[in-house]
Image (tube, rainbow, N blue to C red):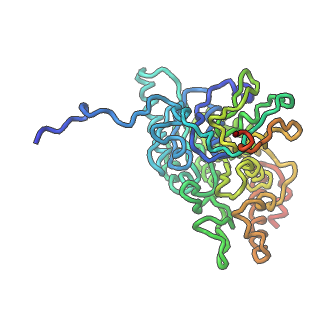
Amino acid sequence: MTSVKELSKRKDIFCAGHRACSGCAPAITMRQVTLAADTNLVAGLSTGCMEVVSSIYPYTAWRSSFIHNAFENVAATISGVEAAYRVLKRKGKLSANYKFIAFGGDGGTYDIGLQSLSGAMERGHQMLYLCYDNQGYMNTGIQRSSSTPFGAATSTTPAGVKIPGKQQFQKDLTEIMVAHNLAYVAQASIGYYRDLNKKVEKALAAPGPSFINVLSCCHRGWRIDPADSLKYSKLGVDTCLWPLYEVEDGVYKLSMKPREKLPLEEWLKGQGRFNHLFKPENADMLKKFQEYVDKKWERLLWKCGEGKEKTKEAGK
Amino acid sequence: MSKLKGWKDIPIGAIVPHGGTAFDYETGSWRSFRPVHDRDKCIDCLDCWFCCPDNAILAEEGKFKGFDMMHCKGCGICAKVCPPKVGAITMKPESDFRE
């Protein structure tokens, strides 16, 4: 793992002057991920905040090669670029080495781009797909996505009297990617940036396609203070809603076990989109959400070969 | 009707001359809070440099060098990631710095 001091001597690939909101956590993700790649890079972006803010004509925030095609096909686009690169290499027309990273938001990954992602991963291209998950379609005005957590108020699932926020639990994309039998799959959070850095280095060195899912909070959508962007991304991990783990060739490994598992309220309170959950009439929703998180955490511990006794008890 | 121009005769449009042109774009005017750095307290861990969304913290030879006020949007993340025991960065209202 490269130290921060070493990284600071590198030149930023995702440069200053992009037009993300102040305190944007996905922008930090972009920067840190591209810094971890110490070779020539080809970045592909699906439509989303990071594509929009970094490529406003005539400006581009990318110092590497950059390709954007459409919302649903960033994985297919990058896999095509990678295939062309391999052909050029084989014919001896290109001598430099390149790495390929496809970036997508949760909308472009969980919902719209799922089929192209699945296809590219199945074909086994030497690429990394990195999803920055801010739990909603934040770019277009905070609509719900399949990654939006239970109970969250968005513009399409407002906290009303009859229906208080989103009624479904979030989709577990990392597990879907594990089922693709990839060389490397990991779940990370921008709150734990050293861990993210380590995982990106590992994923780029993996022999085959790799996938990383990064929780990057959107302070506009989550209704928090911009300066707390990293705090809430970190709390998501500490409450075990977003555990940090990696899967190498089907073997689960927990990257970090919180010293003390915090109750989910720690993460929910302070976020404007969950304000209504703290009303007395919604207490059962809070309980349901906590039970869901506990169950998933227990299951993950079991997969990682930890906490077997507890799972047995849960099985009874 | 005269013959239409071929694609080779039409001037090339939409050129971005090189990578990283966004660097010339000023985002510093968005700022309403300004980070102020205390050299005596700073331990040069560079966590602020690593976590700045706008690359507005300059580092040289592994040491904190200063802020890039042309790009700093004043989000205050640097002040939050600075270890609590160190507290080398504070946010001051931008109005304090204007005449």
* B53, above or below A313, in the image: above
Residue furthest bottom in the image: A162
Residue furthest front in the image: B99
Image quadrant of residue A127? top right
Tell me where residue A185 appears, x and y as whole percent: 64, 44
Looking at the rendered image, the quarter that the N terminus of chain A falls into is top right
Residue furthest right in the image: B85
Q: Residue at x 69, y 38 (%)?
A: B52
B15 relative position to A22: left or right: left
Q: Residue at x 63, y 70 (%)?
A: A158
Residue furthest left in the image: B1
Image quadrant of residue B3? top left
Image quadrant of residue A69? top left
Tell me where residue A26 appears, x and y as whole percent: 63, 45
Q: Residue at x 10, y 42 (%)?
A: B1
Nearer to me, B6 or B96: B96
B84 relative position to A133: left or right: right
Tell me where residue B54 appears, x and y as whole percent: 64, 38
A135 relative position to A101: left or right: right
Q: Is residue A251 visible?
A: no
* B55, above or below A227, in the image: above
Looking at the rendered image, the quarter that the C terminus of chain A falls into is bottom right
Tell me where residue A4 appears, x and y as whole percent: 74, 30
The number of discs equals 0
Q: Is residue A170 visible?
A: yes
